[in-house]
Image (tube, helix red, strand yellow):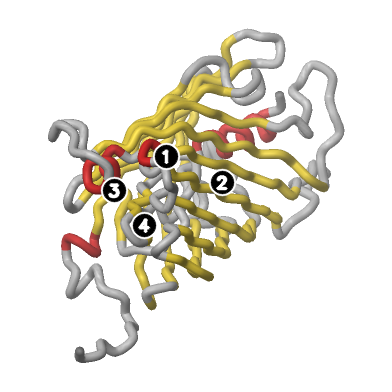
């Protein structure tokens, strides 16, 4: 794999989704998930988020060890609209290199939610601002061009199911279309349009404890899940080169995850299992510490800038 192609693959696998947040719809808490963003908007700070993956070379030999450390801050403007900003530092071994990614901003809007059926639908537009990360002279440069990404999110809890054992389950999903603002680089290589999609299946012990039957205290704030994210080039794809991974190949990771929901924070852990050699060599890891600013400072920092007036009873 060429250096440029490798860096693109590593960036996809290690990227922490912007505007990490927990969302409450009716009785359902959708936690921060590590492979995709959740479907709501909130005032939150993810600091830090961490990812690790060992890559593989096309001939099967071990590739670079890649790491990422990032932060994200999300601020509600109205109860249904939030802006966020984030950045990430990447470094690798074999060979050694490091650098900052471009700054990414996002506007996210909740289109519809139904508390009774624990359903929510949202959309977002994010921009990775070219030239705001490490320069081209660094060992791990950021893209000199910007990328615009349209996103869609969905979440559904099964608290309305007629069978008790189904009620703690929930699913979330995300689909992104990323379009670079520069199609052809000076060296004539192409910047592809990329479709990224993912989902999570969650079983909320927090929900079970509150609405189905009580659990021991140690378990009643946990949400185990299984999730995955995948990325596939759709257009403007570079030609295949013998001895390198195919530039049109879908890459991604799947794996189990576990989330602990505290009063003002969340801790999440996930094992990343690569779906093929182009995605990684063996199991990696992701982790996040997320602070709920809407619970820490509900009347100041955690309050939407513009809210509808409160009606007196």
Q: Decide which of tag 3 and tag 1 comes sooner along the chain.
A: 1
CA separation in Å, label 3 and label 2: 26 Å
Residue 12: % across, % down: 58, 38
Image check: 198 left or right of 258?
Answer: right
Q: Residue drawn at (30%, 55%), measured in percent from left and top?
A: 45
Image check: 162 left or right of 149?
Answer: left
Count how many numbered circles sit on residues in the image.
4
> Residue 78 or 179: which is nearer the viewer?
78
Dot 1: within a 10 Å radius of its alpha carbon, few (fewer than 14), some, or many (20 or more) residues? some
Mark 2 near mark 1, Cβ–Cβ under 8 Å?
Answer: no
Tell us which disc is closer to us: 3 or 1.
1
CA separation in Å, label 4 and label 1: 20 Å
Mark 1 sits on what residue? 166
Label 4 element class: strand
Q: Residue drawn at (57%, 11%), measured in percent from left and top?
A: 62
Asked if residue 100 can be seen in this view, the reply is: no
Residue 306: % across, % down: 34, 83
Label 2 element class: loop
Label 3 element class: strand
Image check: 28 left or right of 184?
Answer: left
Q: Decide which of tag 2 and tag 1 comes sooner along the chain.
A: 2
Q: Residue drawn at (49%, 29%), measured in percent from left and top?
A: 97
Image check: 260 left or right of 169?
Answer: left
Mark on residue 97? Answer: none
Mark 4 sits on what residue? 23
Q: Residue drawn at (31%, 57%), measured in percent from left and top?
A: 27
Mark 3 sits on what residue? 290
Mark 2 sits on what residue? 142
Q: Decide which of tag 4 and tag 1 comes sooner along the chain.
A: 4
Q: Decide which of tag 4 and tag 3 comes sooner along the chain.
A: 4
Tell us which disc is closer to us: 4 or 2.
4
């Amino acid at each position: 794999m060429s250096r440029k192609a490798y860096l693109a693959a590593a960036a996809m696998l290690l990227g922490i989704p912007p505007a990490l947040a927990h969302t409450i719809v009716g009785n359902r808490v959708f936690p921060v998930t590590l492979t995709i963003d959740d479907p709501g908007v909130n005032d939150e700070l993810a600091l830090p988020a961490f990812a690790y993956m060992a890559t593989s070379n096309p001939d099967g030999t071990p590739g670079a060890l890649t790491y990422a450390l990032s932060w994200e801050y999300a601020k509600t403007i109205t109860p249904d609209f939030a802006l966020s900003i984030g950045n990430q530092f990447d470094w690798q071994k074999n060979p050694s290199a490091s650098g900052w990614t471009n700054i990414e901003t996002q506007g996210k809007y909740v289109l519809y939610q139904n508390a009774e059926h624990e359903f929510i639908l949202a959309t977002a537009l994010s921009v990775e601002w070219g030239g705001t990360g490490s320069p081209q002279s660094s060992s791990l440069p950021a893209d000199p061009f910007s990328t615009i990404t349209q996103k869609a999110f969905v979440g559904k809890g099964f608290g309305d199911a007629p069978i008790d054992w189904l009620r703690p389950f929930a699913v979330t999903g995300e689909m992104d279309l990323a379009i670079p603002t520069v199609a052809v680089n000076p060296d004539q290589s192409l910047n592809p349009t990329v479709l990224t999609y993912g989902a999570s299946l969650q079983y909320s012990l927090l929900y079970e404890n509150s609405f189905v039957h009580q659990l021991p205290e140690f378990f009643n704030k946990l949400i185990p899940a299984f999730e995955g994210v995948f990325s596939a080039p759709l257009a403007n794809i570079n030609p295949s080169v013998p001895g390198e991974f195919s530039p049109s190949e879908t890459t991604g990771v799947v794996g189990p995850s576990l989330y602990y929901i505290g009063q003002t924070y969340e801790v999440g852990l996930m094992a990343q299992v690569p779906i093929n050699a182009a995605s990684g060599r063996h199991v990696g890891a992701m982790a996040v510490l997320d602070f709920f600013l809407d619970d820490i400072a509900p009347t100041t920092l955690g309050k939407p800038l513009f809210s509808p007036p409160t009606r007196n009873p």
